[in-house]
Image (cartoon, rainbow, N blue to C red):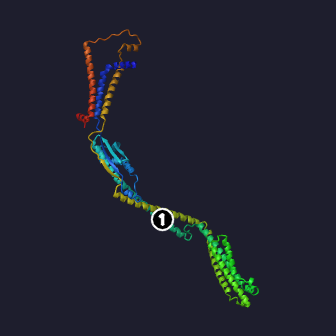
Amino acid sequence: MNDQIQLLRRQVRMVWPYRWTALIVAGVACAVGWGAVLLLPNQFEVKARIFIDTRSMLRPLLQGLAVTDTNLASSAMLMKQTLLTRPNLEQVARKTDLDLKSKSDKEFDDIVTELGKGIVLEGTDKDNIYAISYVSPDARKAKRIVDELLNTFLETALGSSRKDTANTQKFLDDQIAEYEKRLIEAEERLKQFKQKNVGMMPGEGENYFTRLEMARKELAEAELAQREVMRRRDELKRQISGEEPVLGMIDSAPVAGGLSSQYDARIESLKAQLDQLALQYTEKHPDIAAIKQTIAQLEEKRKEELAAAAKAQAASPAAISPSNVNESPVYTELKMTLAQSEADVAALTTRVDEYRNRVVQFNKLVDTVPEIEAELKRLDRDYALNKEQYTELLKRRESARLSQEVDQKADDIKVKVIDPPRIPITPIGPNRLRFLSLVFFAALGVGGGIAFLLAQINPRFHATDELKEFTRLPVLGAVSMVSSRRQRTERRMELAVFGLVLLGLFAVFGGLMSLEALQFDLHSHLTKLIGIS
């Protein structure tokens, strides 16, 4: 620590002979620096605050009917960002006559760029309060710029929603016209295709393979019914041909076991059908129940007929003879039933032929019909898609029209100017207190630095220890300087003057700081004094 103190004292002694140089340099630097600081132009800030009200009473009531913006605060932020676009800045520059200062496109471009850098937008979506501010040496110019920015912001807020709605309406009209044209073309293609392939169109929910399977099923059912009717016809023929032998048996056979009835064949046929149905259905199936009931009735009639025949045989065996067969009601009924069976066979044969022809035709069209059905599905799908889009666009156009009417009745975004722009009286800058302090301490540093540099260029020894340390030789002695009274007086006067000048420099610094702290307009007085406007 002692060595450091000794080193400091040595440096001070080396610099001390150049104290006036240091003071003069510091004074000149302070004068130049303070003058530059005082001549810095004042900066005036013009600010306007606005409140964006995004509440609307109509929008909640029309939810689902009209197009609503669910994030209006974000829309406000978007308008805030689009306010500083290049076209808007150029418009503001022209309206505030900033373009008059430019002589070329390059200069005007620089003016617009500087204008954009000077504009500050502040605010948050939380409270929807935004501030537009601009700083300029000319307070009136700053106010004009903020006024134009505010007007642009209001126009954007009030007009953007309606402009977007109009653009949307036009877009929807164009799209509806386009899809209407497509829909008409799809309908025409579908109509021509159906006219060209008439007779091969599938039914609702059917395709080629479904229709082929249905035709085969119908053919199988018709063939089964044909076989049943043919069997019934053959049985009737057998009964008719055996009617006479049966009557002969009545003459020769005993009543108890030799009689037969016309209902025997029908009963056997129905029993065969019952056995076939029993393989497919349960006992509760309606067809099985109906056949059982019919068999029971026929058996009852068969018993009555056999009983009547037995009585007749017992009473008069000659009453029934081959000559009376044609007049027998049983024979007549069998003939009528046979005729009906023949008609049924003919009808079922026609039906079987028709179904067989259908199956053959379907088999021939195994490659054509599926292609037709696939093409029809594609046309139907194309038509349904165009129709769906056309219907959806009609709904959206109606929503857009309703939204446009809502926009004309009430604005979603209302802008209220809370604090209008005004010409400021007090500048916000520059911070001359800070700049004056920086200049003062920098000037002292520069003066001290120059004195130290001169001391290093022209070094001197102020003590025998310094000389001994530098030369590394023994010092035999030193001759002291004896000053006269006059020299001592002059030395005291010189020190006093130096102290007064240094004190005056500090006093000037303190006075400038005090005046600036009291907001005394030194800038205006200095500019008037030297004739700078």
Rendered position, 351 above or below 312 = above
Q: Quadrant of residue 282?
A: bottom right
In the displayed structure image, the side of residue 159 where residue 336 appears, left or right: right
Residue closest to the far right: 252
* Along the viewing direction, whichever of 482 and 405 lies nearer the viewer: 405
Counting from the top left corner in percent of width and height, residue 55 is at 36, 53
Tag 1: amino acid: Glu
Residue sitting nearer the eye, 426 or 294: 294
- Determine whether 51 is above or below 336 in the image: above
x then y, percent, for residue 241: 71, 84
Q: Which residue is mark 1?
A: 185
The residue tagged with tag 1: helix, strand or loop? Answer: helix
Closest to the observer, 349 or 298: 298
Which image quadrant: the C terminus? top left
What is the x, y in percent for residue 330? 68, 85
Residue 478 sits in quarter: top left
- Classify residue 30 as left or right of residue 239: left
User: Is 506 located above or below residue 476 in the figure?
Assistant: below
For the image, the number of numbered tags is 1
Asked if residue 356 shows in the view, the reply is no
Q: Is residue 385 left or right of residue 23?
A: right
The residue positioned 31% from the left and 11% from the top of the image is 481
Label 1: few (<14), some or many (≥20) within 10 Å? some
Residue 532 left/right relative to 382: left
Q: Quadrant of the N terminus?
A: top left
Residue 109 image offset from top left, x and y in percent? 35, 44
Q: Spot the residue most to the top.
A: 476
> Is residue 471 shown above or below 241?
above
Q: Is residue 426 visible?
A: yes
132 or 250: which is nearer to us? 250
